[in-house]
Image: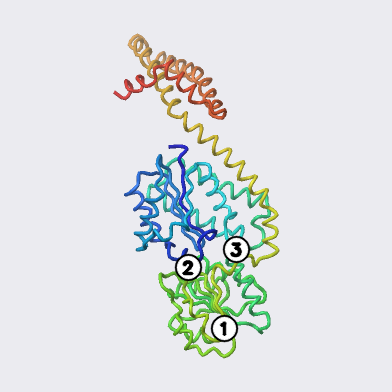
Amino acid sequence: MLHNFKAVTLSHKKAPLDIRELIALDETSCKQFLQTLKDFIQATDLLVLSTCNRTEVYYTADVDYSQDIIKLLGITKGLNITQYLDYFTIINTHQDAVQHLFEVSMGLDAQVIGDIQISNQVKQAYQWSADNEAAGPFLHRLLHTIFFTNKRVVQETSFRDGAASTSYATVELVEELTHDLDNPRILVVGIGEIGADVCRNLRDNTVLNNVVIANRTNAKAKVLADECGFEVLPFENLVQGMKDADVIISSISRETPFFTTEMVKRLDVLSYKFFIDLSVPRSIEADVENVPGVLVYNIDTIQNKATEALDQRIASIPKVKQIITESIDQFNDWSKEMMVSPTIHKLKNALENIRQEEISRYLKKLGPEETKLVDDITRNIMQKIIKLPVLQLKAACKRGEAETLIDVLNDLFNLENQVESINK
């Protein structure tokens, strides 16, 4: 199954935020869904990736399991998934699925182009797959090729220069919203990956430095606050902190909104208060924007804010795509060689079997030193004999002619029967 890599994807390209947040999986759900896939479909190389912009499943199988995967996803989320089928994209072509995962991992397919967070999220998804023994040799090699490609992109292009991530775009939005305020007060609630990144970008900002962090786990908030030089607001004092803040940035992870309309109404907003929701599912109730004086921005509105960095990244796209093409070509060469690996192994076993049979006829007549000398000589002869067929096989792979040579070697050395005799 070396050429049967597939993908099922739901992303910001086809699905609006309210649909994406219904389908999104948190870390625990991703791990559980990975196990569900292992239990219910006959596939290998499983990878489950879920971010604020996409929920995707990659797998290797001889058959198309896309409908089964979508149904299982619906069961996992407790949804009648059939009404959302049009938002999914099915990628059943091996090369297209490989290309898609490369582009996703590099940030070419991100909502904020070149977003570095996606690279870390792919690494995390791969770790879950490896921990669950859901990754085979193909996926291991593919992901490590992707990680190496990412390093090349960083070193050879301007695609990752600047800070055009979602978190930086958030900081730019805050700058725009508060440009006429003196020392605006910013409250960051929830410090998962994106919340922590927002805090670090705020730390590096020379204008926005009146920042308070609130998190359910106070100790975690204190560690980040000490790193960034910010204050910590005890979570039980959150309402007062919201009253004091000009901007509330939320990246709380939960299934239902944390900030409700009734809660925000009780703040008695006198002028303007800005809420920025970075969570998927949303942590700020949609109707909050109807509260007088309150403006709400969600993840779909926070894009293309880092204009200069974004322009640099867009200009780097052709070079990034060239690097991806080179990496995929190299990966395909490896994949093709994997096709002949069993034949090479069988050929080596066949020759080794012949060598051992012939040596065994004379061992009784030889001393230890002579036995070692004969063993070394015959082993070297065997390695020289097999070298040319192996090189020819690998070359035939690149030409797309490996199957013919495999058949010839099978016939010449009777490899199938030879292997059977060895296994006995």
Badge 3 or badge 1: first in the primary sequence = 3
* 297 vs 290, nearest the viewer: 290
Amino acid carrying label 3: it is: Ser
**Label annotation for residue 165:** 3
Q: Is residue 100 left or right of residue 127?
A: right
Picture residue at 54% right of the left edge, 88% below the top: 269
Amino acid carrying label 1: it is: Lys
Q: Position of residue 321 (x, y in %)?
A: 63, 47
Q: State the separation of the CA atoms marked 3 and 1.
A: 24 Å
Amino acid carrying label 2: it is: Asp
Q: State the separation of the CA atoms marked 2 and 1.
A: 23 Å
Badge 2 or badge 1: first in the primary sequence = 2
Circle 2 residues within 10 Å: few <14, some 14–19, many ≥20 = few
The C terminus lies in which quarter of the figure? top left
- The image's colouring method is rainbow
The number of numbered discs placed on residues in the rendered structure image is 3
Q: Is residue 312 left or right of residue 42?
A: right
* 147 vs 331, nearest the viewer: 331
Circle 1 residues within 10 Å: few <14, some 14–19, many ≥20 = many
Picture residue at 49% right of the left edge, 69% below the top: 279
Q: Position of residue 29 (x, y in %)?
A: 38, 60
Task: Provide the secondary structure element on which disc 1 rests.
Answer: strand
On screen, residue 83 above or below 396: below
Q: State the separation of the CA atoms marked 2 and 3.
A: 21 Å
**Label annotation for residue 273:** 1
On screen, residue 351 above or below 277: above
**Label annotation for residue 18:** 2
Task: Provide the secondary structure element on which disc 3 rests.
Answer: loop
Picture residue at 39% right of the left edge, 51% below the top: 67
The answer to which quarter of the image holds residue 360 is: top left
